[in-house]
Image (cartoon, rainbow, N blue to C red):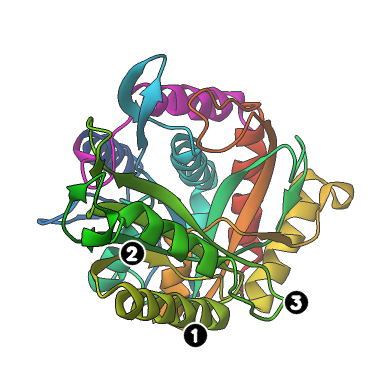
Amino acid sequence: MDKKIEERVIDTFHYLHEHAEISWEEVETTKYIKNLLEKSGCRVTVFDDCTGVVGEYGNFNKGLPIIGIRADIDALWQEVDGEFQANHSCGHDAHMAMVLGVLWKLEQQPDLAEKVAVKFIFQPAEEHGTGALKMVEKGVAENLDYLYGVHLRPQQEASMGKATPVIVHGATKMYSADIKGDDAHGARPHLNHNAIEIGAQIVNMLGQIHLDPRVPYSVKMTRFHAGGKNTNIIPGNASFSLDLRAQNNQLIEQLETEVNHIFDSVKELYNVDIEITNTGGIAAAETSDVATAIMREAISEAIGADNLLPPLVTPGGDDFHFYTIKKPELKATMLGLGCDLQPGLHHPKMTFNEKALINGVEILYQAILKTK
């Protein structure tokens, strides 16, 4: 690759890392990318009611397969060195830089402008699990034939210089709930139901859910708050959150059914009201053998067949898969890029080998060339 492009990709990554913005607030990020897309000759689309930007490059009038390349653009809100801030600890800054690098590499070959049709999708709010659905609502995926994504992988999954042609993400669901009751004096436990004991009952019942053991799944309480400063009050109210995960979309539905049965049983057992809010979720991967095969060839061409890893199955999630859920005929896959990422995704001090960005650009570029 041209050294100027390599330097530009790295510099762009650093700029985006230093100017992180959280989900649905990526205003300056959208403006920055829009400007770069326009300078590269893309036909650019932005939206009146949300962040995100799309750039079309190439010939969309020749009957060529229309290829989407998606990058997520939002950062997390987390504590870093004792201070809460927007922080790119999931690699979205790297994803944006790589996708822009693909555009710049295409520009180096002016004749390709008549031979490809590429839609560069810079999507907001992946961390909320709602950005992809908004892009689908905006019609971004309507004319796509293929969609490729990319995500940095922790070193435990893929070392530097390696890559997998498909990430098989699991499904997630999140619940927030409030136990509604009355407080009682510590000397009179017969006058109310202790919300802490109700929470403990829910935890115990969650542990008794048994589904198909051949498919990974989990459900756990991730937050519980009850009581205040006084130790002689039995709390009747509490709030808590649940995190549900399953490796496919069928099992997550079964898991949800079991959890709702538990809520119903506890309500009846304690004669207490539990207000439940489904706070969202992400669909499991619906993968395409065709797209995966293309990405496999692209990896072999770009970094060598010896560096090709098998499909990666992970309980983590990504809203990328809503594109194929909403448009089943879309052939899509997500590249998993080895980069010696440590200590892990979403760690406030996450780091990786920045040279991997160039590998990502080369692989995605080859995927475009090999898509027929």
Closer mark to the observer between disc 2 and disc 1? 2
Front-most of residues 87 and 262: 262
Is residue 68 visible in the rendered image? The answer is no
Q: Is 74 situated left or right of 247 in this image?
A: left
Query: What amino acid is at disc 2?
Result: Gly
For mark 1, give the secondary structure: loop
Q: In the image, is 43 to the left or to the right of 312?
A: left
State the image coordinates of residue 190 (x, y, percent, origin top left).
27, 60
How many angstroms separate mark 3 from mark 1 (CA)?
Answer: 28 Å
Quarter holding residue 270? bottom left
In the displayed structure image, the side of residue 72 where residue 109 appears, left or right: right
Residue hosting label 3:
214
Q: Amino acid at mark 3?
A: Arg
Q: Which residues are magenta?
A: 1-27
Taking depth in this image into account, of 127 and 104 the one nearest to the observer is 127
- In the image, 52 versus 346, the foreground residue is 346
| Location of residue 197 (image quadrant) | bottom left
Query: Does the residue at mark 2 contact the one at mark 3 (Cβ under 8 Å)?
Result: no
* Disc 2 and disc 1 in contact, CB within 8 angstroms: no
Q: Residue furthest top?
A: 81
Q: Residue at x 23, y 36 (%)?
A: 228
In the image, residue 352 sits, relative to residue 370, either above or below, namely above
**Residue 369 image point, x, y percent:** 62, 60
Q: Check disc 2 and report the residue beneath it.
A: 280
Checking the image for residue 329, the label placed there is 1
Distance Cα–Cα, label 2 vs label 1: 25 Å
